[in-house]
Structure formats: structure tokens, C-alpha cells
Amino acid sequence: MRLKEGDKKELIKTEAIKMIIKDGLEGFSMNKLAKACKISVATPYLYYKDRDDLILTIAKEEGQRMSDAILKDFDPEADFEEGLRVQWKNRYGYMTTYPDRHFFFEQLRNSSYQEEFLHHFLQRFKEVLGKFWDNAVKRGELDHMPFEVYWSVAFSPMYSLARFHNEGKSLGGKAFKMTDEILWKTFDLVIKALKKA
């Protein structure tokens, strides 16, 4: 059965993400991709100029999808705890719904594609989240600190838990499954660490 044009393009994107997660960017090629998709080697070139164009196009599209998911129902004017709770809910939801996309982005973040990917992904994201952070500092909910410190304390615990959940194990190989209780208990600790008393 022949695939429709839209189906071919979606198959190419899906297989490319799977291959990059499994073999890394170094092991990824258009020839291997075509073979995995069971299509002609020329077919990916109907949609993408070359390997770099394919990777960056997927990264931009998926980055926009992730940004939209993370910013869903988020109000930069919200009080700090409420706004951060929405961020945690959205980020955790995205990472557990699309774990393959998260691992794909991790590959990009550790590659020569990082700068171009982040440039496109972070434009709107930085504006909205920067405003939220500034508002919380102005209202006296947070002490002023380097943004990198804020980001590390605010989100690293959730990302670590989501990673353990997606891998099915924590440090030392111990089985791990995330629960709402673990997620929100950790969130409460983060709030205590960041919020002014």
C-alpha cells in the first residue's frame, strides 16, 4: 500500500526522531532514514534540503509544539506559586506524554545544533517566562538572584523526576514510577526553597 504525501513526511519525521534518540546525531544519515522508512533514498530530499535541514526543521516544529504545551493556561501575571505550579504541570505533562521528544531535545542540546535550535525555541518562551520571574521579584515573592540559579532550583528537580519516570528507574537502577504525591511534594520543597518567607 502506497503512503500519501503527508503520511510519508510524518513517517520520515517520526523515524528520524527515533533514530536520533537511539543512535545519536553521529549515527544518523538520510540513507539510514530512508531504509528505516522503507522508502526511496530520494524521498526525504523531496521535503528537506539535506540532513541539517531535516534535523532543524523537526527541531523547530517540535520546539514550537513543546513551547505551546508548556505555556498553555500560563499567565505571567499570576502569583509565583500559582504560576510555577502551572509550569510544573505543563512541563511534566509534556515530558511524560512525549518522552521521545524530550530525549530528542536532549540530543540537540548536546550538539552543534543547540544554538540554532534554542534561538528559535526560546524567543517567545524567554519573553513570557522572563516577565513572570520579573513580576515575582517586583512583588517581593522572590529574592533577586541570577536567572540560572532560579531556573536550576525551580525546574531541575521536576526534570530529574520525569527522567527517572521515563527511564523506569532512579539512581543505582532502583525501579521508579512517578506519582502525583511525589511530584507535588517535591514542588512544595521547591516553593519553600525559592519563595520569601
Image (spheres, grey):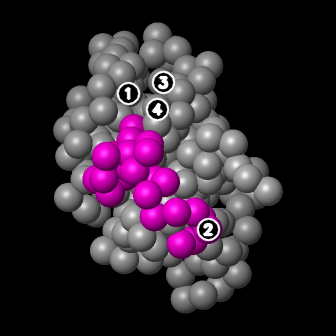
Which residue is at a point 49% across and 54% down the rendered structure image? 43
The stretch of residues the image draws in magenta is 35-60
Q: Nearer the viewer, residue 67 or 78?
A: 67
Where disc 3 sits, the SS reads helix
Q: Amino acid at mark 4?
A: Gln
Q: Are marks 1 and 3 in contact (CB under 8 Å)?
A: no
Q: Residues within 10 Å of mark 2 (few under 14, many from 20)?
A: few
Quadrant showing the N terminus: bottom right
Q: Give the foreground label among 1 and 4.
A: 4
The picture places residue 35, in percent across and down from the top left corner, at 54, 72
Query: In this rendering, would 82 be left or right of 195?
Result: right
Mark earlier in primary sequence (3, 4): 4
Q: Is residue 72 above or below residue 175?
A: above
Q: Which residue is mark 3?
A: 80
Q: Which residue is mark 2?
A: 38
Mark earlier in primary sequence (3, 2): 2
Between the C-alphas of marks 2 and 1, the distance is 37 Å
The picture places residue 194, in percent across and down from the top left corner, at 40, 39
Q: Nearer the viewer, residue 5 or 87?
A: 5
Per the rendering, the mark at residue 64 is 4
Q: Amino acid at mark 1?
A: Phe
Mark earlier in primary sequence (2, 1): 2
The picture places residue 129, in percent across and down from the top left corner, at 38, 25
Per the rendering, the mark at residue 125 is 1
Between the C-alphas of marks 3 and 2, the distance is 50 Å
Q: Are marks 2 and 1 in contact (CB under 8 Å)?
A: no
Q: Nearer the viewer, residue 50 or 135?
A: 50
Q: Amino acid at mark 3?
A: Phe
Q: Give the foreground label among 3 and 2.
A: 2
The picture places residue 156, in percent across and down from the top left corner, at 43, 54
